[in-house]
Image: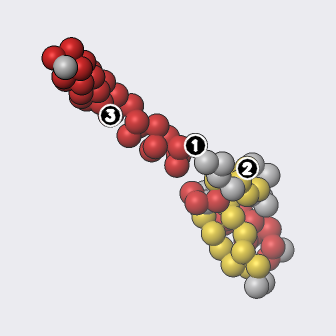
Amino acid sequence: MARFILFVLLFVLLYAILYYLLKDTVVRRKKLGRESEPEELVQDPYCQTYIPKRTAVRKRVKGRYHYFCNKKCLRNFLEEKKS
């Protein structure tokens, strides 16, 4: 009976040590899982580069949304459309 109690205490101690050492790794893995999900890419109609949709500059032109990599491309695109 004493061996069993010693074994259980050793198991609990080992579990606590491993949990303490690995808890940051588990948290990091969960965060990375969310960040590593694929992002939707959109193409800039002016310079033809692909950019993540969430960081793009969005502008509605003639009832349709266009996504640009920066404001300079947006300005150039609008000037091109005017002429």
- Give the structural element (helix, strand or loop) at label 2: strand
Q: Residue furthest right?
A: 83
In screen coordinates, is 27 left or right of 41? Answer: left
The quarter in which the N terminus is drawn is top left
In space, the residues marked 2 and 3 are separated at their CA atoms by 37 Å
Give the residue type at disc 1: Ser
Residue 71, position as x, y percentages in the image: 60, 61
How dense is the environment of label 3, judged by Cα within 10 Å: few (below 14), some, or many (20 and up)? Answer: few
Query: Is 20 located above or below residue 29 in the figure?
Result: above
Residue drawn at x 69%, y 56% is: 40
Q: Please tell me which residue lies in front, 41 or 56.
A: 41
In screen coordinates, is 5 left or right of 53? Answer: left
**Viewer can see residue 81:** yes
- Sequence-first disc among 2 and 3: 3
Is label 2 in contact with label 1 (beta carbons under 8 Å)? no
- Sequence-first disc among 3 and 1: 3
In space, the residues marked 2 and 1 are separated at their CA atoms by 18 Å
- Labelled disc at residue 23: 3
Determine which residue is flagged by label 1: 36
Q: Nearer the viewer, mark 2 or mark 1?
A: 1
Is label 2 in contact with label 3 (beta carbons under 8 Å)? no
Query: Is 80 located above or below residue 72 in the figure?
Result: below
- Labelled disc at residue 50: 2
Residue drawn at x 49%, y 40% is: 32
Which quadrant would residue 14 be assigned to in this image? top left
- Give the structural element (helix, strand or loop) at label 1: loop
Q: Residue furthest front?
A: 1
- Give the structural element (helix, strand or loop) at label 3: helix
